[in-house]
Amino acid sequence: MVDLAVYGRLARAQVRSQLSYRGSFAINLVAQALAQGSDLIVILIVFGRVSSLGGFDFHAVLLFYALSGLSFGLADLSVGSIERLPSYIRTGTFDIVLMRPLGTLTQLFVSDFQLRRIGRALTAFGTLVYVLSTSDIHWTPASALLLVLTPLAGATIFGSIFVAANSVSFWLIDAQELANSVTYGGSYLTAYPVSVFGRALRILLAYVVPGAFVAYYPALTLLDHPDPLGAPTWLGWLDTPVALLTATVAGLIWRTAVRHYRGTGS
Amino acid sequence: MIGCYLRITAAGFHRFSSYRHAVLAGTATNIVFGLIKVGILSAVYLARGGGSIGGYDLTTTITYVWLGQGLLAVVDFWSNDELSERIRTGDVVVDLSRPWNLQAALLCTDLGRAGFNAAARFVPQLLLGAVFFPFHWPTDAWVAPAFLVSTLLAVLVSFHLRFLLGMTTFWLLDSRGVRGLYGVLSVTMAGLEIPLSFFPVWAQTVLWCTPFPSMLQAPINVFVQVGSVTQLLAQQLLWVVVLAAVGRLVLARAMHKVVVQGG
């Protein structure tokens, strides 16, 4: 509990310092919101040319996009600062992280907490509100619960991807961009029906990295839409167990990576 | 003097060639994004039952994807903030007092970078697209030199825009917000995510009046032979001249503004 208070204080200090540059913060927030918005523009342009994509109409794809964007936005906000890990390792600051009597991961999450990243989640949330208000989903207590669980499970999956992928920096210091292929790449892919992608890509980014459980399967369950690839519609309910499993695997990878780390000494 | 600039260009080339893992990681990431894009855009043609959209059929579109992914590192939309950082810390004073033209010197470094990335990032992805995917090879011999010129002009437009972004630091002191916004908007408007010919006609008209398509869509259109080459190249050249002149003007204004503290 004491630890939690410390993390809270560290994050609040970050937010206070960011809010003191109001103009810069506002522009950065807008940039983040637009970064998410540009994917939305692409979907709008695509549906200006076709009426269905991979067997799904505009509303279904918009729901994939909104759930995927909200999950990614929440993950980016809470754990996205792990992207700075290479600079921690290069400059030797990671030694300090290891010395403090606090968790290594949580320290990295809060010590560069960037409130502007909420911009992505805001665009996605706005889209989600629009989709839900115009779609004819048959609401039951169960589907409402699934709707609440989905972004949380999705954020956990993306957060785990962030951690696992950035662990590569412990071995290859200048290969951080590789992590982008599964983090940002995952966010790009999960906004579309999994059915449009080729086999190799689907296996890699939808099942090994369980991107299909971020938005695709839960949305199929919510819409009660059959999967063109033949999966049962209840599969969306597995998003929470899959998220917990992913988080466990990511935790193990992180632990192995930190054990591998040798400081440069001084 | 020319020799000095040539050496700066070579140094730029050499500097970027020393990060081998970064090149591999960057290429792998470009390829993953390329595969995702091929999936989405192929689904568009599947849903339409083939055909073409503004001169782009399925083969042309897949070719567009690999050209775009390869050109991304050559043209460079998200370059490092070295100039901004040097302006913010005041180190730029040293650069300004050297017997060179700062704009020209930075351009030479950038050309070296672009040259290295053309060999290390563009060519491998071009080959990947050509070998494993349906590929639109140019049907005329003049396309190759025209594409080279167009790519060079694209790099120049990109450099001058990034130079102007860096220059804003003289007035804003922190250009991160502006650069973040540019990084987001420029790629979509340049036609990275989806070919500009997929856009509604009014949006295409507006976008082609901006310098953004000159950085990516123009060289790609030259390669896949969509639109008039003369018009594309002329448009790019116009933007290079305009942006270079503006950059020169802004640099001159900034020089008046610089106050060197201490001695």
Image: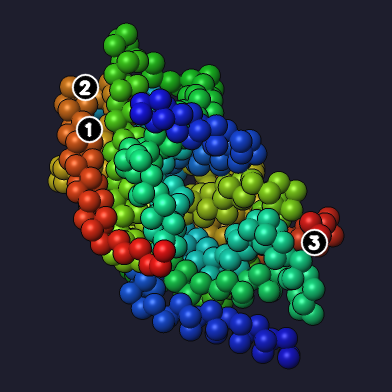
- State the residue at coordinates (41%, 37%): B110
Asked if B133 appears above or below A67 in the picture, the reply is: above
Asked if B190 appears above or below B92 in the picture, the reply is: above
Residue indicated by mark 3: A266
For residue B229, the mark is 2
Looking at marks 2 and 1 on the same chain, the residue that comes earlier in the sequence is marked by 2
Label 3–label 2 contact, CB within 8 A: no
Secondary structure at badge 2 equals helix
Label 1 is placed on what type of residue? Gln
Asked if B153 appears above or below A89 in the picture, the reply is: above
Tell me if B20 is positioned left or right of A129 in this view.
Answer: right
Label 3 is placed on what type of residue? Ser
Label 3 is found on which chain of the structure? Answer: A
| Residue found at the very far right of the displayed protein | A259
Q: CA distance from mark 2 to mark 1?
A: 11 Å
Q: Nearer the viewer, residue B181 or B29?
A: B181
Secondary structure at badge 1 equals helix
